[in-house]
Image (tube, helix red, strand yellow):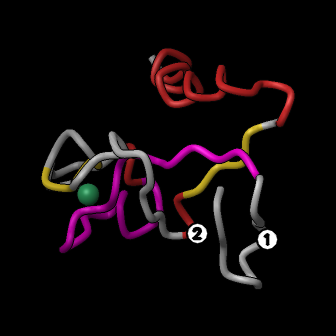
């Protein structure tokens, strides 16, 4: 992370990955309760996949609530966190 809001709990040098999915604009019951990974109406959005720019850039911005801290010991292997979470869910 290059920079972060002072009250975010993150700071320069932290390793983070971004959550891909976002709730649908008119949330279904699952999205309304923060469980947008279980969206019932299919109108969710996903960065780089469905309706939103992805993370395939040298620098990108991320809402704090969609940032997940990665243990520094993982280093670059931390990029595997999101696909690993998909496998774990399955
Ligand atoms: Zn939904």
For the point 44% across and 54% down, the residue is 59
For the point 44% across and 16% down, the residue is 90
The magenta stretch spans residue 18: yes
Most extreme residue toward the right, as rendered? Answer: 73
Residue 67 is drawn in which quadrant? Answer: bottom right
Q: Which residues are magenta?
A: 14-35
Residue 36, x across and y down, in percent: 38, 53
Which callout, 2 or 1, points at the residue further toward the start of the chain?
A: 1
Q: Are marks 2 and 1 in contact (CB under 8 Å)?
A: yes
Badge number at residue 64 = 2
For the point 46% across and 66% down, the residue is 33
Q: Please determine whether, in this image, residue 17 is positioned above or below residue 88.
A: below
Residue 38, x across and y down, in percent: 36, 44
Task: State which image quarter holds ligand 1.
Answer: bottom left
Q: Residues within 10 Å of mark 1 (few under 14, many from 20)?
A: few
Per the image, label 1 sits on a secondary structure element best described as loop
Q: Please determine whether, in this image, residue 81 is positioned above or below residue 14.
A: above
Residue ID for mark 1: 9
Residue 76 is drawn in which quadrant? Answer: top right
The magenta stretch spans residue 26: yes
């Amino acid at each position: 992370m290059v920079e972060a809001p002072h009250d975010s709990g993150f700071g320069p040098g932290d390793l983070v990955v971004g959550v891909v999915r976002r709730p649908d604009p008119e949330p279904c019951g699952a999205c309304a309760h923060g469980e947008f990974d279980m969206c019932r109406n299919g109108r969710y959005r996903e960065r780089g996949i469905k309706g939103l720019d992805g993370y395939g850039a040298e620098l990108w911005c991320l809402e704090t609530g969609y940032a997940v801290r990665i243990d520094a010991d993982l280093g670059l292997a931390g990029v595997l966190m999101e696909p690993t979470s998909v496998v774990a869910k399955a």
